[in-house]
């Protein structure tokens, strides 16, 4: 049976409505998963963040100079590897501290950074204690801390460079 010219717009409109419905359902599922993953992450005032950087210098979080991206990652994490160039790019012109969780010694981390061509600052978290203190039960996890020391964004899983840059900009 051949479709008439009058029926075609109805079929096309129905198809678009189904696609729109499917996209909305996918977005809702994605948002629910993101919320579930981030439910235990630190919120409100940022927890203390101190320790040794992979180059041996001491570090203490001081967000007073503007918003800071606090990023937890691991050298063994495939998702972390997907976003490491984006984090390194942000670190070239914004305040960023990355925390290598359960990724080995400073020598191992520095070798990894050299091998990957990364220049970001790395705070050592060999035991995962810092990550637990921030509620990061997995990696990658990202936080934006504003100039008042409050967490304005906390998320777990892959984050795009543009998404993190926009969140940093909004925290100013």
Image: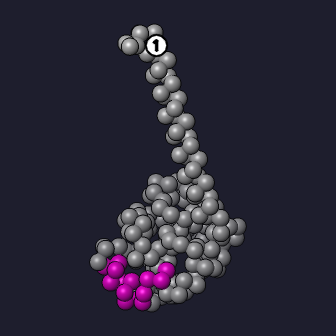
Judging by the rendered image, the residue that carries numbered circle 1 is: 7
Give whichever of 115, 2 is nearer the camera: 2
The answer to whether residue 25 is above or below residue 122 is above
Query: Which quadrant of the rendered structure holds the C terminus?
Result: bottom right
Q: Image quadrant of residue 161?
A: bottom left
Q: Residue furthest front?
A: 1
Magenta stretch prevailing secondary structure? helix
Q: Position of residue 101 (x, y in %)?
A: 49, 80
Is residue 86 highlighted in magenta?
Answer: no
Give whichever of 12, 80 is nearer the camera: 12
Give whichever of 165, 15 is nearer the camera: 15
Total marks shown come to 1
Q: Image point 58% across, 73% down: which residue?
A: 136
Q: Residues within 10 Å of mark 1 (few under 14, many from 20)?
A: few
Query: Which quadrant of the rendered structure holds the N terminus?
Result: top left
Q: Image point 39% across, 83% down: which residue?
A: 109
Disc 1 on helix, strand or loop? helix
The answer to whether residue 2 is above or below residue 151 is above
Query: How is the protein colored in the picture?
Result: one colour
Q: Position of residue 163 (x, y in %)?
A: 50, 54
Q: Is residue 62 visible?
A: no
Q: Image point 50% across, 71% down: which residue?
A: 139
Give whichever of 111, 66 is nearer the camera: 111
The answer to whether residue 148 is above or below residue 104 is above
Tell me where the magenta segment starts and ends, as one range.
101-114
Q: Position of residue 42 (x, y in %)?
A: 65, 70
The answer to whether residue 32 is above or below residue 156 is above
Q: Image point 53% across, 29% down: which residue?
A: 17
Q: Is residue 35 visible?
A: yes
Is residue 112 highlighted in magenta?
Answer: yes
Residue 84 shown left or right of residue 63 in the figure: left
């Amino acid at each position: 049976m051949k479709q008439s010219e009058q029926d075609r717009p109805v079929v096309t409109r129905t198809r678009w409505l189904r696609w729109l419905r499917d996209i909305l359902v996918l977005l809702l599922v994605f948002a629910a998963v993101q919320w579930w993953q981030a439910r235990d992450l630190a919120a409100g005032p940022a927890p203390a963040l101190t320790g040794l950087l992979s180059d041996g210098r001491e570090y203490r979080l001081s967000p007073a100079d503007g918003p800071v991206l606090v990023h937890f990652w691991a050298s063994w994490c495939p998702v972390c590897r997907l976003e490491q160039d984006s984090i390194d790019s942000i670190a070239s012109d914004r305040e960023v501290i990355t925390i290598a969780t359960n990724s080995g010694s400073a020598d191992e981390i520095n070798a990894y950074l050299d091998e990957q061509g990364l220049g970001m600052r790395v705070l050592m978290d060999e035991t995962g204690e810092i990550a637990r203190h921030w509620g990061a039960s997995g990696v990658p996890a990202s936080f934006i801390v504003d100039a008042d020391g409050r967490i304005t964004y906390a998320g777990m899983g892959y984050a795009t460079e543009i998404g993190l840059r926009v969140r940093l900009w909004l925290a100013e």
